[in-house]
Amino acid sequence: MTLVNDAAPEVRSTGRKFRAFTAKHLDELTARAGLSPEEQLATRAVATVLPFRTNAYVLEELIDWTAAPDDPIYRLVFPQPDMLPAEDVAVLSDLLCREAPKAEVEAAANRVRMKLNPHPAGQMELNIPSFGDGKVPGLQHKYDETVLYFPKQGQTCHAYCTYCFRWAQFIGEPDLKMAGDDSHQLRDYVAAHPEVTSVLITGGDAMIMGESVLRRYLEPLLELEQLESIRIGTKSLAYWPQKFVTDPDADDMLRLFEQIVESGKNLAFMAHFSHPRELEPLVLTEAVRRIRDTGAVIRTQAPLIRSINDDPKIWETMWRTQTRMGMVPYYMFVERDTGPQDYFAVPLAEAYEIFRNAYKNVSGLSRTVRGPSMSATPGKVCVDGVLDLFGERVFQLHFIQCRDAELVNKPFFAKYDPAAIWLDDLKPAFADRFPWQ
Ligand code: SF4
């Protein structure tokens, strides 16, 4: 690849320095979206519970302010006044209005957070393994072949998504955080588990880290023969593509990617794109080209979110555009059972129809995508269809991934329920219990 930055001048000119906007800028930004003073206060109240952060690129290049507050990218990053129960928002608004002490606001916000299932799918209890003298901080080992690692320096993002299922990672509460900073402990753990063939570095956003920090985590892994792939979970291509084009360490980062590929491992970018607009800027096209030139593969994924991307045309456009750019559509997820799930959830029956109506219109190259898929406690469950069988309407589902590998790729059935939004809402069909129960 070319390590001289050969991006076109109009792309280089978007290479301003990263500038973050946080809750203290909310009034100014929500006024720009035309919110009334009451709505502005309610937005700030919601932001005491759920994290808010965005940046100048998202504000100026991605949001269509003429359509705000209904614009999908605005809704993707800005808290909505009605995202939390009205009674909670009223209590918090009242505290903010009378300028209550910070500790009082934080205590009230924390009470609301605890009602929002901060660590879904048994993340804190079931997935953190013991090793040597105790737990390995920041490491999760749910499926035999894959280890997830949450580096301490990667626990933030270039902007936060309102629907984020990892929202608990971004607030100051230490009990809600998973993070580690011992790259050798990670390597030793993997070496002691020969069944592990893939490490996923995630967060937050792993690509918030600079090259030298990311290198500290990844280099020790390159000596492990057993590892077939290193995956990086990131929304940086959508929220800050300059990371790979004009940031001061962009070229060094690409060299690190080349080094991983040259070590004989598959470097997979698990890129999160929520809406086709994120694929439009020239700087994104350039970032994708430069990453692909290193030999890394970019796979794309996102959750299906009400009012942001709950339309088959949106998914069809995303998958077509991504395929055209050389990325590989990978997953459509169902919104997880955490945070403001009720607000963003699309029922499983509807999610299946949206998936099918997008999937049927794309070429075989885009049909690498799977979904709608739930990352639930027993594993990743895909909704395959709605059938009428033996006089009963049912969902057909299967495990894409499962704690019990014997159950992977075997169909099972659940009673049809048009209102079900998650695995826990389903009842078994033609059996007294589900195969994992
Ligand atoms: S980029 Fe990912 S981790 Fe970060 S806020 Fe969005 S969904 Fe959450």
Image (cartoon, grey):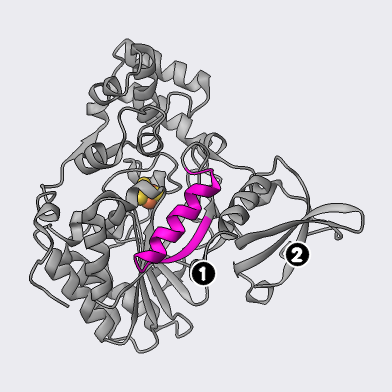
Report if residue 136 is visible in the image: no
Whether residue 107 sits left or right of residue 247 in the image: it is right
Q: Examine the structure image and report whether residue 327 is included in the region drawn in magenta.
A: yes
- 145 sits left or right of 101 in the view: right
Q: Is residue 251 above or below residue 41?
A: below
Numbered label attached to residue 412: 2
For the point 45% across and 42% down, the residue is 163
Q: Quadrant of the C terminus?
A: bottom right
Q: Check disc 1 and give the amino acid type.
A: Thr
Find residue 15 and report its horizontal and vertical position in percent.
12, 51
Residue 102: image quadrant is top left
On the question of residue 30 being in view, the answer is yes
Q: Quadrant of residue 355?
A: bottom right
- Hey, what amino acid is under mark 2? Phe
* Magenta segment: 309-332
On residue 317, which mark appears? none
Label 2 residue SS: strand
For this rendering, which residue is in front, 90 or 122? Answer: 90
Quadrant of the drawing holding the N terminus: bottom left
Residue linked to disc 1? 368
Residue drawn at (30%, 29%), measured in percent from left and top? 65
